Each structure stands twice: as structure tokens, then as C-alpha cells.
Amino acid sequence: MTGLRISRPVLWLLLAVFAVCNMVTSTVGANVFIGIGFGLLTLACAAALVRGHYASRGR
């Protein structure tokens, strides 16, 4: 597997931080594009965690 490899605890931390930032920007009423950005980053972290889970599962 090539590319950037980030450990699972770091991904979980980033997932939590981005999810909280997404909730805060939605609650405060900040620019919609900022909320969309945090939502996409949250989704990317979740996808990386799922991909890592299935990649290590077959070993």
C-alpha cells in the first residue's frame, strides 16, 4: 500500500475534532462552505478508518 499512512489513534482524534468543528460551525451559523469543508474532512477520516480496518482484517 502506498501513500500517506496515519495511525488509527491520530485518525480517531482528527475525526472527533473535525466532527466537533462541523457541529460548531453549523450551530453558530458560520459560512456554509466552512461547514461543508469540515464535513468532508470528517468523512475522509471515517473512510480512512474503514479502509484501514478492512485492509488489516485479511491478514
Image (cartoon, rainbow, N blue to C red):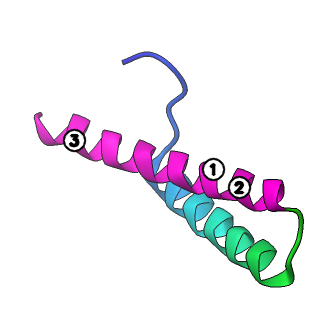
Q: Is residue 33 magenta?
A: yes
Instruction: Look at 69% across and 77% down and name the residue there.
Output: 23
Query: Does the residue at mark 3 contact the one at mark 1 (Cβ under 8 Å)?
Result: no
- Quarter of the image holding residue 35? bottom right
The amino acid type, in three-letter code, at marker 3 is Tyr
The amino acid type, in three-letter code, at marker 2 is Ile
Which marked residue is nearer to the observer: mark 3 or mark 2? 2
List the residue tagged with mark 2: 36
Which marked residue is nearer to the observer: mark 2 or mark 1? 2
Q: Secondary structure at mark 3?
A: helix
CA separation, marks 3 and 2? 27 Å
Q: Residue furthest top?
A: 2
Residue 22 horizontal/vertical position (percent): 70, 68
Q: Secondary structure at mark 1?
A: helix
List the residue tagged with mark 1: 41
Q: Would residue 8 be found to the left or right of residue 52 on screen? A: right
Dividing the image into 4 quarters, which one contains the N terminus?
top left
The magenta span reads 32-59
List the residue tagged with mark 3: 54
Q: Is residue 7 above or below residue 10?
A: above
Q: Secondary structure at mark 2?
A: helix
Residue 40 horizontal/vertical position (percent): 61, 49
